[in-house]
Amino acid sequence: MPSPKVRNAKWPQKPIDPFLLAAMERQSTQPAAPADARTIIRRLHFDLTGLAPTPEEVEAFVEGSSPAGNRQSAIAAAVDRLLSSPAYGERWARYWLDLARYVDETASWLEKTTSAHLYRDWVIKAFNDDLPYDQFVMRQIATDQMGLPPQDRHALAFLGLAPTYWKELQLPPDIIKATVADEWEEHVDTLSRTFLGLTLACARCHDHKSDPITAADYYAIAGVFASVRHAEVPTMGDEFWLPVKKARESVAALEKERDELKKKKPAPADLTNQVAAIDQKIAGLKTGTPHFNMAMATAVEDAALFVIPAANNKGTVLDFKPGQARDLELMKRGDPNKTGDIVPRRFLSAFPAKDGQPRRFTTGSGRLELAQAIVQEAAPLTARVMVNRVWRHHFGRGIVDTPSEFGLTGDAPSHPELLDDLTARFIKNGWSIKWLHREILLSAAWQQSSLAPDSEKRDPENKLFARMSRRRLDFEAWRDTTLACAGTLERSMGGVATPLTSDKNLRRTLYGTVNRHELEPMLRIHDFPDPAAHSAARTETATALQMLFSLNSPFLLAQADALVARMEKEAGPMLNARVTRAHAILFQRPPTAKELAMATGFLTGRETDKKAWSQYAQALLASNETQFVD
Amino acid sequence: MSKDRHRVFAPVLWTRRGALEAAACGFGSMALSGLAAEPAGAMAHPLEPKRPHHPARAKRVIFLFMQGGVSHVDSFDHKPLLTERDGQMFDFDDARKIANSGKREATSQRVMKPLWKFGRHGQSGRWGSDLFPEMCRHVDEMTFIHSLRTEGIAHGPATLFLHCGATQFIRPSMGSWVTYGLGTENENLPGFVSISPSSGNGGPRNFGNAFLPAIYQGTALGKAGAPAGEAVIRHLSSSGSAAQRRQFELLQALNAEQLKRTPGESELEAVASSYELAWRMQHRAPEVFDLSAESGATRALYGIGDPKTDNFGRQCLLARRLCESGVRYIQVTYGDNSANPAWDQHSNLPKHKDHARAVDKPIAGLLQDLKARGLLEDTIVWWGGEFGRTPYAEKNGTGRDHNAGGFTVWLAGGGLRKGHAHGATDEWGHKAVEDKMHMHDLHATILHLLGLDHEHLTFRYSGRNFRLTDVHGRVVRELLA
């Protein structure tokens, strides 16, 4: 696509800039001035890692980016450094997990999610490895059918962690059918909104009113999910798995035998010996079987589900037929008990394959063909949706500002040609997300200042991108940065989630337990989305309950104490030095004379009072400036 | 795959500019996308009081949730036939039996008479049993709905349906909708409060905001099973010391410094003003929570001091104090955290009396107190569970099973017909037969009393407008004064 003509030819740095500038010039608007180096490095660190830069990183960057001629190469170097830091994957994985309605735990009576954290870790690694986005999409739908090593099956938790609903099998099939149909709907909804930016679920009941999506399209896709079931699957090949499976079954049988033996009344005379003998056998199996503790993946496997009456008509049976697939009948107004014609599984009719027909799904459940269609026939849309998501996280506003809704009911793109062009180049560059970050971060547009009163007045929503939007940190970035600044953040990556309520939990927030049944109140009050449904974007609220958390929570009180210890250690006993250090750590700048005076006023006469220092540190941690990125 | 990449420039429909611009239904910002009642001022805070859709008859709601399902045929739905035929076997189309057999045919059940004696009460002569003698003294204030029906045979779905109007999908709870529609009258307190909520049967989802902005979520005070004294706002410091005031002043001075550098930044101001609100809440909320400020007579009215009624009495008194302070939607739960909650007497119906003993006096006290203070005129008190119970014994025992097909709740207060009974179940008290009313209708009617049109209180999410009553619900005008 030809680059639009602009008058201010000096301003553009990257191909996205002329598109934005041309639109600004049409509205007689000027871009904002470039942000200063300290602002840029803070913005860059938060955008890519969700953590503030250290004072040393800031000083090195400020030095390296002057004179002005060195600025672009200094930014490029910083971008490279941050994209290769593990913290990058942790930050961007969390955005993805919102879309994937990720959970660590659900209600005990529902399907297991014990390996959920391995999916979270898979997503972190995928971002850190810059796994091409088309591959990233396909593997989450069908990695087990792509000839990839079985360790990759953790990716399938995108499907395996779908919400399930309790099915009271004493009830008749017509009731259970509705519950099962609701589960299929959730699958279709999350899949279509995450990858395609389409709200396909509306079509369960009727043809889409505004987009060319029909009810038949819905059932053609839903049939794929009627042909899979939740499963914990091995992450090694059969040569390892089959012996492990056998050994695990033997252990389970032995454990049962032992427990029954213990319950026996009267107790056998040689109970202790018998139990010891069984325990020894169990231990032998566990140590003698290679990879006995092999990780399982929370995943799906192909099996068609038929909801049928139980024998003697007593309730319902969920009849799974492993390896089989089924096409669904169209349900009138979404009612599974009012069915019409069978709809063969296939992709959406709006995206025909080369033969003019939507791709048919004929292999197994059709997951692989579905995945292929998403990144091939629907590539222009699939790529646009992701390009727009990444854009939105960098600018605080999307080119399409309804990131999971690209249909006619969504928001119109503010710069359609720009989105087309960037998408085309994204695909040409191998669907590389890291490439996309560089295109955006090295642009003049992204490097603008957020201080542009004229533009704020004329374009309060910043549809022209004629300044940087000031953004408030999400809870994860705020909590992580609080820990990092206090010097208490534990940087170990991955593994089982641990509760955030524990004061011993000093890990990044994305490793905190997310429970679908009972969401941690700390997350709930801080705009964390309900993990039972795809979340396209977080709603931002500023509530008194959040502020009470900042003012009084044990978490913040403890971090304030830790920050004081760090100030003392790094800046010595003098008030001025300590306050200066605190500003460098938290705000990447020295204090103003006024701020220094405020600190002096607050602390004079109490310089040795730990409590007073702690209160000062807490005020800094709780202040607006820690929560916003300019 | 690469051979398909040329398709990028194909004019796919989603990017055709003309088509997109022609679509009138695009929207800009999630938070502003709904059709909530109009804010009173231009750039109002999301919790500022809003003008209702039509003149309101009531300003706030106290919902007394009897978790587990009170037996209507033992309390307010008088069915003499049950006493006449006590112990005899009759055919009923029992919901669970139908489920178990898969056949829509009646099964033989043993009729069980009400365990408590019924009588007529007040000037209106409404029926009530000895199960709730104190409440019966207030029937002239009440509007009984004897013909309510709901969805869900089990507690989980039925409890979610009661609160959110849906059995399993993620939907905002009624209190969130009301707060979204009307804002709050007291910015020092949350607009929607749930006192001692249960963690079972949907747990926090029953006071959750779902896709509405989090500012509309219910604030849980304490939890079921814990003493009422623990029903407080989290992280509310009680110290309020001079040192803390000094720290708070420093914090706001720091924020003011930043605002000076970035004038006119509404989001920064929003956070700074939330701090002000938190600070005021910190200092004013403890007053609201301090029940010791009440006179001995008032405390006694709620049964505080009597070990049997003390806990629920405190919850009800707190509800009145919150109501008086302008909290929009207050739920008080009598329940626990188990899967088979408090009122769920499958096998031992006499146990109903223990629960009744715990709630009867506090609820009667609440009604009397609200009336004395003139609050009942513009407050709706809603008493009820997620469903009722069967008129026959479960498994031929001494308890009753769930009954979602017909049961009783009562309302009292602003805009409601006093001493009125609406609808009826069949002669057994099993199925609603006369003026049947669905839970969606109850939701629609309560919203109507608050000045909200249930069809227009919508929020745009995932491509469509959602509302509490989905595509159902009707305002039952017979209930209105």
Image (tube, coloured by chain):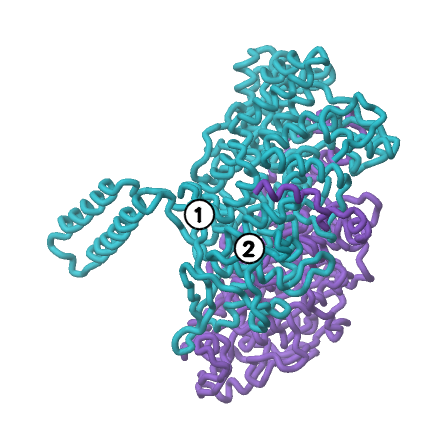
Of residue A384 and residue A248, the one placed in the foreground of this image is A384
Q: Residue furthest front?
A: A355
Of residue B53 and residue A164, the one placed in the foreground of this image is A164
* Alpha carbon distance from label 2 to label 1: 18 Å
Name the chain letter of the residue that bears numbered label 2. Answer: A
**Rendering coords of residue A144 (x, y %):** 44, 47
Q: Which chain is cyan?
A: A
Name the chain letter of the residue that bears numbered label 1. Answer: A
**Rendering coords of residue A511 (x, y %):** 49, 37
Residue B394, quarter of the rendered image? bottom left
- Say whether residue B31 is left or right of residue B83: right
The N terminus of chain A sits in image quarter? top right
Residue placed under numbered mark 1 in the picture: A144
> Image point 16% across, 60% down: which residue?
A266
Residue B66, quarter of the rendered image? bottom right
In the rendered structure, which amino acid carries the disc numbered 1? Asp
Q: Residue furthest left?
A: A269
Residue placed under numbered mark 2 in the picture: A187
